Image: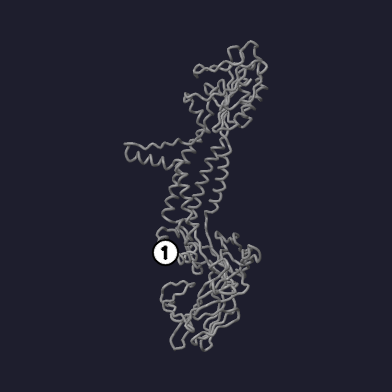
Amino acid sequence: MSDTKTSPPPADAADEPDVERLSSAPEENDAAPVGIGVFGWLRWFWRQLTSMRVALLLLFLLSLAAIPGSLVPQNTNAFKVAEWKNSHKGVAPLFEKLQLFDVYSSVWFSAIYILLFLSLAGCILPRTWQFVGVLRAAPPAAPRNLTRMPVYAAWHTDAAPDAVNAAAHRLLKKRGFRTHLGTGSVAAEKGYLREVGNLLFHFALFALLAGFAWASLASGSGTKIVLEGQGYSNTTTQLDDFTGSRFYGVDDLDAFGFKLDGFTADFQTQGPAAGTAKEFVANVRYWDGADASKQKNARIEVNHPLEVGDSKVFLTAHGFAPVVTVRNAKNEVVYRGPTTFLPRDSNVTSFGVIKVNDYGTGPQGEKTQLAFQGFFLPTAAASFDRTGPISVFPAAADPRLVINMYAGDLRTDSGLPQNVYELDDKAMTKIQLNGQPATAILKVGEGWQLPEGYGSLTFDGYQQWANFTVSHRPGNAVALIGAVTAILGLIGSLFVQRRRIWVRAVAAPDGRTLVEVAGLGRSESARTAEELAELAVDLQDDAPAAEEPADEPAEPDRPDRPEDAAPAAAEPPAAAVPTAPETKE
């Protein structure tokens, strides 16, 4: 029958350390060295850095450090950074000093990143080597007193001890256990995938960090606003901005180009989600290499970039460019064409400046330049009295152009760089009309007779534009594989259980064979007891429980001292079949 023991292990079980330890993780020692010199302190620091606890702490710090990168616009998007600085002029200098506009390349983020890299490397390598040693070694031999194990069963049989041990070895091997047949006992171990999953998780995390590091060292990106009907060639002279890295610069850009044939934007028109985008599609013709004659058609959508060579072209924004014609006092056309206005809200209320550099001579005979600053409203509100110029819908259902006029010197010939989307009004005068700034609110096709005899402006219509981000990030695939592998490794480490089973068959003084089976799991689980019960039942074919003499006591008392422990006596014949072992409380 099953002789199940329910008492806890005694305090002197320290003579069997291999039984209690099923992990290959190195032991951590927090005790600081005393009086062992500089090298001793360095060794202690390295042990702390490579401990699992510090690795988890650094991983948590890295997660916290990445938060500002998602809340504060980064320099990879110069437009949003300039807009943010304009709106937060008080804290912008402090954010610059803290490198919050370049979080992922900042000194403090890199320091955490490198320390985590070193911590993982120092943790993984010795642990892997130790695990390889565990795999190469035989499963630990059966302890002297199997009754100490959390799960235990025993019975007598008339089968020979060697035959019982051989049968147990065969059955355990069939169940996927790593087994070793020793003298008088069988040792078996299973659940190595737990430690494999653990190591796989850490290797994958290491690969994830390596992928991000590779991407930051060998990546680059740039943005470009392209009007409908216009094209783009992937060179720095055509990019609005470019951010490179240590191993990726302007000379490494892939040779390709494309032409924007049309842009389609579709929005919800009814219900609480009115104004929400349903579709953004840029229809392009692109070419790979320097030969622009070999073109292919493609659609670029949000989250569906165009891949050309090692680069990806993402659709990131869209807007409008009002088309105006400006004539001077002699009715000569001095400016005609679209001007890109940048959206300020979800309804694409757009702000911009139309700069007329070649206006010529003003009404007073002086050389002058004009500028018109204001808003393009795709669907203008009925009244601006309380809100100012705003759009109430992102599509161009009722477009308006609301502008003020400036005259003077645009300072475009000063040699200093200027933002084409902003007006440098230091040498410009805002034109007044009846004591108020001269303002025009124009529909498509309407004109404005400019004050003070400067001529006229006509709002001819508008064009749509699309903003594209050209990105080269070689480490993304490595990071993605690392992330997926980390999840798989984590699943293995959480759901696979490491356990050991021992079977001992020895000749008893009465000439029969005493069969003992015991199990030990790394964590509390009913699975160990279930496996032990199944093994005991399967062994009945080769080692059936023998009937006990009627006058033999059912079970002797367990000795208080481990050294006095003796094999448990069998139960009476009526209970001779082993039952499911119980787990000790």
Question: Is residue 57 toward the left or the right of residue 280 in the image?
Answer: left
Nearest the viewer among 270 and 248 is: 270
Q: Is residue 291 visible?
A: no
Nearest the viewer among 244 and 368 is: 368
Nearest the viewer among 170 and 32 is: 32
Quadrant hosting residue 498 = top right
Q: Where is residue 131 in the image (x, y as percent from the top left)?
A: 50, 36
Per the image, the residue denoted by label 1 is 90
Quadrant hosting residue 428 = bottom left
Q: Can residue 401 be seen in this view?
A: yes
In the rendered image, which quarter contains the C terminus?
Answer: top right
Residue furthest front in the image: 386
What amino acid type is highlighted by mark number 1? Answer: Gly
Nearest the viewer among 441 and 482 is: 441
As drawn, 555 above or below 524: above
In the rendered image, which quarter contains the N terminus?
Answer: top right
Question: How many numbered marks does the figure carry?
Answer: 1
Colour pattern of the rendering = one colour
Q: Is disc 1 placed on a helix, strand or loop?
A: loop
Estimate how packed mark 1 is, as few (under 14), some (14 to 19) or many (20 or more) residues with alpha carbons within 10 Å: few
As drawn, 566 above or below 181: above
As drawn, 215 above or below 122: below
Q: Where is residue 525 in the image (x, y as percent from the top left)?
A: 58, 32
Q: Where is residue 152 in the image (x, y as percent from the top left)?
A: 58, 24
Q: Where is residue 168 in the image (x, y as percent from the top left)?
A: 62, 24
